[in-house]
């Protein structure tokens, strides 16, 4: 048990959300990979481009689902004498204890809570307005068993695993009174993006990676109509350079864009971690390596 002048943490309900998001990730990745394999097997130009576009469209939700799973796994509600703290993905909230007016289980209220859009198990997130309660801000993972924490200008909706224990601990800390009142603070993904883009090194690496990826796409778009086939690899069985339909060049900017987004996501995560700023720079800078390599490959082998 924690001493009452320490903080105590509670995880949100996670099991259903982890299963749902993991299953969705597997489904999206499998479908996108299958379509990409079909893309590579197409001889007809029209079908090649069609399957490639379908593969990309199917893959679009993947980073969004992955982020929601990551956010759920790291989510935490923290209570101490001075305030209540929420960490959910790139979002964090600090609420001074003296700003909290009441705490109640949603099941004790006579009104039904309007859930945010796209609410699923593991990710009940966003803002809604209730006719009876006013502004509701959700940091929740369960669609049914919620706790409401009323602040001065909004009501927070959360779903700790052990509701009765959470409410008991919360009331105990509130009764003890604050030792050193904290400042209300809120940070989110938009704030992180603004901070990264203000950093001259991060901005240079991000813009460099984006520019090289776009340049690769433009170059490939000009080359496809100009060549019926291109050399993209070496066949070990025949010991000869292998010819492929020129539209296969589209796979290069697609791969570059995928790794650019991966590096951007991981680099952003490292950027907000104390002591990992140089690791973040290195990750963001590496987003320029692949498009640059592909550009050199085209210039040396294809043109």
Image: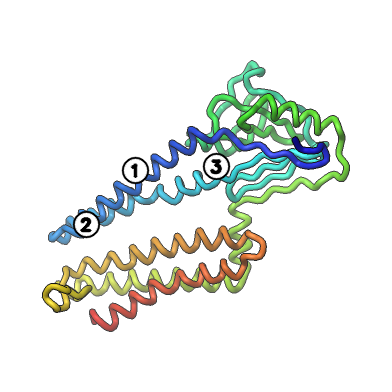
Q: Position of residue 170 (x, y in %)?
A: 75, 31
Q: Residue at point 42% right, 42% down?
A: 22
Instruction: Tell me which numbered mark, 1 or 2, is placed earlier along the sequence.
Output: 1
Q: Furthest-top residue in view?
A: 110
Q: Nearer the viewer, residue 8 or 94?
A: 8
Instruction: Give the alpha-carbon distance from disc 3 to disc 2, as whole Å.
Output: 34 Å
CB under 8 Å between callouts 3 and 1?
A: no
CB under 8 Å between callouts 1 and 2?
A: no
User: Residue 219 — which label?
Assistant: none
Q: Nearer the viewer, residue 294 or 18?
A: 18
Q: Position of residue 185 (x, y in %)?
A: 73, 48
Query: In the rendered picture of this protein, how many numbered marks are placed on residues?
Result: 3
Closer to viewer: mark 1 or mark 2: 1
Instruction: Give the alpha-carbon distance from disc 3 to disc 1, as whole Å.
Output: 19 Å
Q: Helix, strand, or loop for circle 1? A: helix
Q: Position of residue 212 (x, y in %)?
A: 41, 73
Instruction: Tell me which numbered mark, 3 or 1, is placed earlier along the sequence.
Output: 1
Q: Nearer the viewer, residue 65 or 14?
A: 14
Residue beneath disc 2: 39
Q: Position of residue 76 (x, y in %)?
A: 64, 41
Q: Helix, strand, or loop for circle 3? A: helix
CB under 8 Å between callouts 3 and 2?
A: no
Please identify the quadrant where the N terminus is shown. top right
Instruction: Sort mark 2 into few (<14), some (14-19) or many (20+) by Cα contacts within 10 Å.
Output: many
Q: Residue at point 16% right, 73% down?
A: 235
Q: Residue at point 73% right, 36% down?
A: 153
Instruction: Sort mark 3 into few (<14), some (14-19) or many (20+) by Cα contacts within 10 Å.
Output: many
Residue beneath disc 1: 27
Compared with 192, 117 (above or below) is above
Q: Helix, strand, or loop for circle 2? A: helix
Closer to viewer: mark 3 or mark 2: 3
Residue beneath disc 3: 72
């Amino acid at each position: 048990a924690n001493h009452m002048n320490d903080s105590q943490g509670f995880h949100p309900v996670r099991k259903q959300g982890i299963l749902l998001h993991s299953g969705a990730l597997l489904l999206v990745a499998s479908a996108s990979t299958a379509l990409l394999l079909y893309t590579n097997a197409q001889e007809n130009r029209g079908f090649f481009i069609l399957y490639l576009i379908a593969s990309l469209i199917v893959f679009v939700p993947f980073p969004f689902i992955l982020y929601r799973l990551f956010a759920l796994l790291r989510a935490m509600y923290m209570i101490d004498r001075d305030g209540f703290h929420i960490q959910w993905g790139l979002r964090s909230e600090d609420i001074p204890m003296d700003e909290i007016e009441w705490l109640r289980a949603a099941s004790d209220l006579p009104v039904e809570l309007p859930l945010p859009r796209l609410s699923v198990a593991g990710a009940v997130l966003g803002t809604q307005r209730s006719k009876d309660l006013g502004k509701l801000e959700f940091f929740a993972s369960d669609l049914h068993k919620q706790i409401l924490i009323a602040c001065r200008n909004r009501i927070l909706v959360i779903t700790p695993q052990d509701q009765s224990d959470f409410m008991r601990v919360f009331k105990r800390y509130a009764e003890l009174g604050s030792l050193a009142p904290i400042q209300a603070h809120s940070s989110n993904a938009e704030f992180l993006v603004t901070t990264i883009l203000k950093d001259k090194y991060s901005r240079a690496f991000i813009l460099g990676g984006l520019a090289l990826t776009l340049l690769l796409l433009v170059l490939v778009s000009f080359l496809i109509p100009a060549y019926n086939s291109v050399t993209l690899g070496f066949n070990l069985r025949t010991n000869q350079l292998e010819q492929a339909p020129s539209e296969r060049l589209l796979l290069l900017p697609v791969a570059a864009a995928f790794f650019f987004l991966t590096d951007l996501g991981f680099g952003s995560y490292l950027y907000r971690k104390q002591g990992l700023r140089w690791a973040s720079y290195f990750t963001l800078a590496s987003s320029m390596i692949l498009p640059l390599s592909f550009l050199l490959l085209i210039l040396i082998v294809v043109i």
